[in-house]
Amino acid sequence: QVQLVESGGGLVQAGGSLRLSCAASGSIFKINSMGWYRQAPGKQRELVAVVTSGGSTNYADSVKGRFTVSRDNAKNTLYLQMNRLKPEDTAVYYCNGGGHTTTLKTFNSWGQGTQVTVSS
């Protein structure tokens, strides 16, 4: 009932920047927490950054000071500004959002993922 679509991934050199976006659509009443996760080949999916509807944020230690998560509640859109990228940031980045639909059912949805590749 709620779909998330990521965009903005690509190939960038180490030290460069990328901005990811995640647009949520469907029968949305309210989205509580939204976040970015990533999964590198052969590794488990890990948290990158989350932001609540009130704007509180939490980051993985590995990205603190380099990545900034933000959201536009009016547009149901999540962003991730990634600066000073490193080769170890290479992964598929997934958007996640949880909240309530217009029929007051809870949802927890994932996007399809977007590839970020950082070359050395």
Image (cartoon, helix red, strand yellow):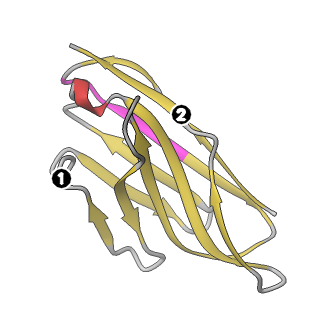
Residue that badge 2 annotates: 114
115 and 73: which is toward the camera = 115
Neighbourhood count class around disc 2 (C-alpha, 10 Å): few under 14, some 14–19, many 20 upward:
many
Q: Is residue 8 visible?
A: no
Residue 84, image x, y percentages: 19, 32
Query: Is tag 1's residue or tag 2's residue first in the polypeptide sequence?
Result: 1
Residue that badge 1 annotates: 64
Residue at 43% over, 50% down: 37
Residue at 59% over, 41% down: 6
- Quadrant where the C terminus is found in the figure: top left
Q: Is residue 3 left or right of residue 88?
A: right
Q: Is residue 59 visible?
A: yes
Q: State the mark number for residue 111.
A: none
Neighbourhood count class around disc 1 (C-alpha, 10 Å): few under 14, some 14–19, many 20 upward:
few
Tell me the amino acid under the disc marked 2: Thr
Residue 118, image x, y percentages: 31, 21
Residue 77, image x, y percentages: 57, 56
Residue at 20% over, 44% down: 66
Residue 54, image x, y percentages: 42, 80
Tell me the amino acid under the disc marked 1: Lys
Q: Is residue 79 left or right of residue 105?
A: left
Q: Magenta stretch?
A: 15-21
Asked if the magenta segment contains residue 19, the reply would be: yes
- Quadrant where the N terminus is found in the figure: bottom right
- For the residues marked 1 and 2, what is the alpha-carbon distance in whole angstroms? 21 Å
Badge 1 marks a residue whose secondary structure is loop
Asked if the magenta segment contains residue 66, the reply would be: no
Q: Are marks 1 and 2 in contact (CB under 8 Å)?
A: no
Residue at 40% over, 47% down: 80
Q: Quadrant of residue 106?
A: bottom right
Badge 2 marks a residue whose secondary structure is strand
Q: Is residue 112 left or right of residue 17?
A: right
